[in-house]
Image: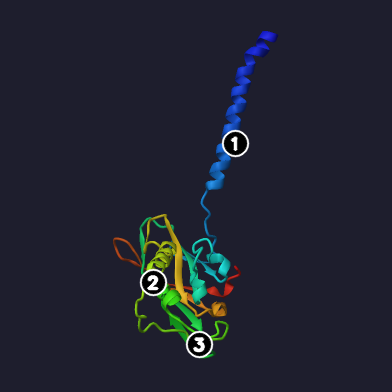
Amino acid sequence: MQTVYYSLMPKLFACLLLSCVGSVLFGQSTAQAPKRQNPSIMDSHEGMTIGVDPWTTASRYKEKFPKKSPFSGGIVALHVNFRNDTDKGIRVDLQSIRLLVQIGEDERQQLEPLSPDDVADTVLLKESGKDPTARRLPLPIPVAKPKPTRDTKWTEFRDACQNAAVPSSVIAAHGAVEGLVYFDLRGEVDLLQTARLYVPNLVTMGDNQPISFFDIDLSHNSSN
């Protein structure tokens, strides 16, 4: 019996060692799994799904922008997720996206998305002595660019905005693309309560077949 017991000891030890190593490796892989954004607002048709998560508090920007944030300059970012469940790639004209905001009872504006250069110019180059808590309407309509006085800090911030933005206008078949789309709300975050995100000009790759536009109601947002 003692002989059998001693002969089993190395095998038992090896099994225990493998079990411990497996547990450690599983824990590491779980900890390193990338965090995915869960959109608070979604709309879907014709095999395309668009999820939108408005970043309406300063804390949402800290991971992507540890130094300077678009939010500090009155710019609000929408984290947008494009998911394509079809067998063909889909192209989205990102520049045609519009944020429709209600200024008054009978006044609505269509805001164009800002490029990373626009965001950096707005946050770092435009100086204003106005009270940031005061209402500053109507909202800006892009007309002229500020004179560039761009330095290393500007470049670093622009690059951070670029890295966080939607990386591609093409969503591969059964693929997804996600990132930030920036709009200058001049800090008027409450305007999102009645805003809509309009996404037109979607076509399938190869045959250029149009996909119906998206008109996403952002008033259902419940995120912070």
Query: How crowded is the residue under tag 3: few (<14 C-alpha within 10 Å), some, or many (20+)?
Result: few
**Residue in the image at 56% along x and 39% along y:** 26
Asked whether the viewer can see residue 67, the reply is yes
Tag 2's secondary structure?
A: loop
Find the distance from the CA under tag 2 to the CA under tag 3.
Answer: 22 Å
104, 16: nearer the viewer = 16
Residue lying at the far right of the rendered structure: 1
How far across and down, in percent of the image, does residue 23 sit? 59, 36
Q: Quadrant of the N terminus?
A: top right
Find the distance from the CA under tag 3 to the CA under tag 1.
Answer: 57 Å
Q: Which mark is residue 115?
A: 2
Indicate left or right for 67 with 7 as reference. Answer: left
Indicate left or right for 27 with 155 as reference. Answer: right
- When asked about the image quadrant of residue 212, the answer is bottom left
Indicate left or right for 176 with 104 as reference. Answer: left
Return the disc, 2 or 3, that comes first in the chain's sequence. 2
**Residue in the image at 55% along x and 38% along y:** 25
Asked whether the viewer can see residue 83, the reply is no
Residue tagged by mark 3?
137
Return the disc, 3 or 1, that comes first in the chain's sequence. 1
Amino acid found under the numbered disc labelled 2 = Ser
Tag 1's secondary structure?
A: helix
**Residue in the image at 37% along x and 74% along y:** 96
- When asked about the image quadrant of residue 160, the answer is bottom left
How far across and down, in percent of the image, does residue 74 sit? 50, 77
186, 23: nearer the viewer = 186
Residue tagged by mark 1?
23
Tag 3's secondary structure?
A: loop
